[in-house]
Amino acid sequence: MTKSIEQTFISPGYLAGSGDPAWVTVPLRRACGWSTAGDPLVPQVILTSPDQLAQLRIAPDPDPAQPWWTLRHAHHGDQRAWGITFDAQTPVEIVAAVTDTLTAPGPPPTASVDPYGPLRAAGWHAPRHHDGLTSPKGMSSPNGLARVDRIVDENGRSAGWVVETSVHHLPAIWRAFVDGNTPSHVASALFGALADATPLVRNPHRVPSLAVAHGSTSTREVSAESVAFALRNRISALAQRNTPPPNASPPGPAAPRVPRRR
């Protein structure tokens, strides 16, 4: 008989809590070839891409105002250096959407995409302020619990974005800061994961209280095997994605030429 265990499905996903960091770190190590480093006396994990251009650092900090996740990418070609930081309670699935996009095989898109595209498609809108006016610089979720604000410098140029999930007048649940030099397709992947309506799965004993109070939760029996092998299946899918196709078999020897008869 197939065993089953209880799992809680949480929507919207940005209220689901952090989850297991291994969802991000293990595939980077096993499927994408990132190397690990760190000081055993310091509670942090550092992963570096094979080309040495990108680095992901996870540094747990007792100060909730400090980010736990820091992704940095060095200057390369025409692309300036950029970075993204995530607070501790950022769902790992949202962080993984960024790292999966960054490690996708093939050259990155050369054409710029609209980062707000996934938000608009999910029904997000320009947030309203106390005076009733809308801001063209940001987008707010339909329930008002999450928003993306664009930061502009003194010259009116985009300096990045701030992603924030909060409930009414309570402190922010988590924030992410996206550098203005971040490639548009990477920012779009982050915003797409933020707006994704697919419920995230969590252990019933680790469901944040705010998710119960302000989100939608349902607990049901699922296959224990699907839970146990979820990470392994994710690693396998990413490894297959990053494996180059086999080279075409070399052509066989040319057939001998038959002399033409006069």
Image (cartoon, rainbow, N blue to C red):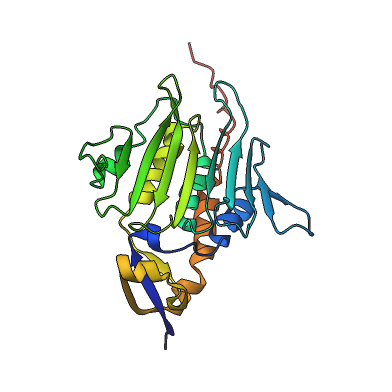
Splitting the image into 4 quarters, where does residue 64 fall?
bottom right
Q: Where is residue 230 in the image (x, y as percent from the top left)?
A: 48, 66
Q: Which residue lies most toward the top here?
A: 262
Q: Which residue lies most toward the bottom here?
A: 1
22 left or right of 140?
right
Q: Where is residue 260 in the image (x, y as percent from the top left)?
A: 50, 15
Q: Position of residue 126 (x, y in %)?
A: 26, 39
Q: Position of residue 262 (x, y in %)?
A: 48, 10
Q: Which of 131 and 119 is in front in this view?
A: 131
Seen in the picture, residue 165 relative to 104 is either above or below; the reply is below
116 left or right of 259?
left
Residue at the (51%, 73%) spot, across then down = 228
Q: Which of 163 and 23 is in front in this view?
A: 163
Q: Which of 46 and 159 is in front in this view?
A: 159
Q: Which residue lies most toward the front here?
A: 131
Q: How many marks?
A: 0
44 left or right of 17?
right
29 left or right of 134?
right
Splitting the image into 4 quarters, where does residue 11 fall?
bottom left
Residue at the (37%, 50%) spot, across then down = 194
Residue 259, can we see it? Answer: yes
Dividing the image into 4 quarters, which one contains the N terminus?
Answer: bottom left
Seen in the picture, residue 16 relative to 132 is either above or below; the reply is below
Residue at the (43%, 57%) spot, across then down = 171
Residue 215, can we see it? Answer: no
Seen in the picture, residue 127 relative to 10 is either above or below; the reply is above
